[in-house]
Amino acid sequence: NAGVTQTPKFQVLKTGQSMTLQCAQDMNHEYMSWYRQDPGMGLRLIHYSVGAGITDQGEVPNGYNVSRSTTEDFPLRLLSAAPSQTSVYFCASSRTRWVTDTQYFGPGTRLTVL
Amino acid sequence: KQEVTQIPAALSVPEGENLVLNCSFTDSAIYNLQWFRQDPGKGLTSLLLIQSSQREQTSGRLNASLDKSSGRSTLYIAASQPGDSATYLCAVRPFILTGGGNKLTFGTGTQLKVEL
């Protein structure tokens, strides 16, 4: 298994540009989520999905859209990038939505918005 | 709102020393607490997971304890090695009875450097 994969690894955007961060898992996991990591603030939950076709907002959802058309993929879209979205983004998945399950994290995408 | 704090933010120790990393949380209604390791440019690797009903968990040179009533957890690393150098994060899961999602609230991390 490849586990949780994320692309790209690095990205530089200009303010106002749009892009999609890709996340995929090959473990048939039901639950997937996106976090952002900023210095001094730890990881914060952006959006999550408890299954294909179902998404919900986390702690810091503004400026981000998600969709879950398949079990494997959970892309994160920035419609109009802002410098405040400069961060490292991590995707995670777990077998089920229940808090008993360990989460597996991808390697992250480092995004810089100029 | 749950808040998770880790002290110290950074720690430098000589090789072979035993050390303790601290994690505190404000809401004791947690289901479990998990310790992660993060290497530069890499994702998070799970180290230990302690259920709320447990007092401690051990894996090799690592021992994690949990005192839910006081809102504290510690990660003890015995006989530290340069390869232990990384950022250590703790995270808690809320005690949710419905399927609202496997959400984690993270601390800010402790950056550990073990020197030769």
Image (cartoon, coloured by chain):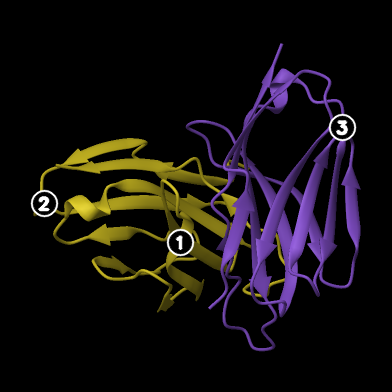
Q: Chain of mark 3?
A: B
Q: Secondary structure at mark 1?
A: strand
Q: Nearer the viewer, residue B114 or A2?
A: B114
Q: Which mark is residue A17?
A: 2
Q: Are marks 2 and 1 in contact (CB under 8 Å)?
A: no
In the image, is residue B12 above or below residue A12? above
Q: Identify the residue at image location x=54%, y=41%.
A: B43
Q: Which chain is yellow?
A: A
Circle 3 residue: B78
Q: Colour of chain B?
A: purple
Q: Looking at numbered disc 3 in the image, what kind of residue is underneath it? A: Ala
Where disc 3 sits, the SS reads loop
Give the mark nearer the N terminus: 2 vs 1: 2
| Real-space Cα separation, disc 2 to disc 1, in angstroms | 23 Å
- Both on one chain, marks 2 and 3? no
Q: Residue at x 75, y 62 (%)?
A: B72
Query: Around disc 1, counting alpha carbons within 10 Å, would you say few (fewer than 14), some (14 to 19), or many (20 or more)?
Result: many
Q: Which label sits on residue B72?
A: none
The location of residue A3, given as percent across then percent down, is 59, 45
Q: How packed is label 2: few (under 14 Cα within 10 Å), some, or many (20 or more)?
A: few
Residue pictured at 37% horizontal, 36% vertical? A9
Label 1 in the same subunit as label 3: no
Q: Is residue A51 visible?
A: no
Q: In this rendering, is residue B71 above or below B47?
A: below
Which type of secondary structure does the marked residue at label 2 adopt?
loop
Q: Chain of mark 2?
A: A
Q: Residue at x 56, y 68 (%)?
A: B3
- Residue under pointer 1: A44
Side of B50 relative to B40 (left or right)? right
Amino acid type indicated by mark 1: Arg
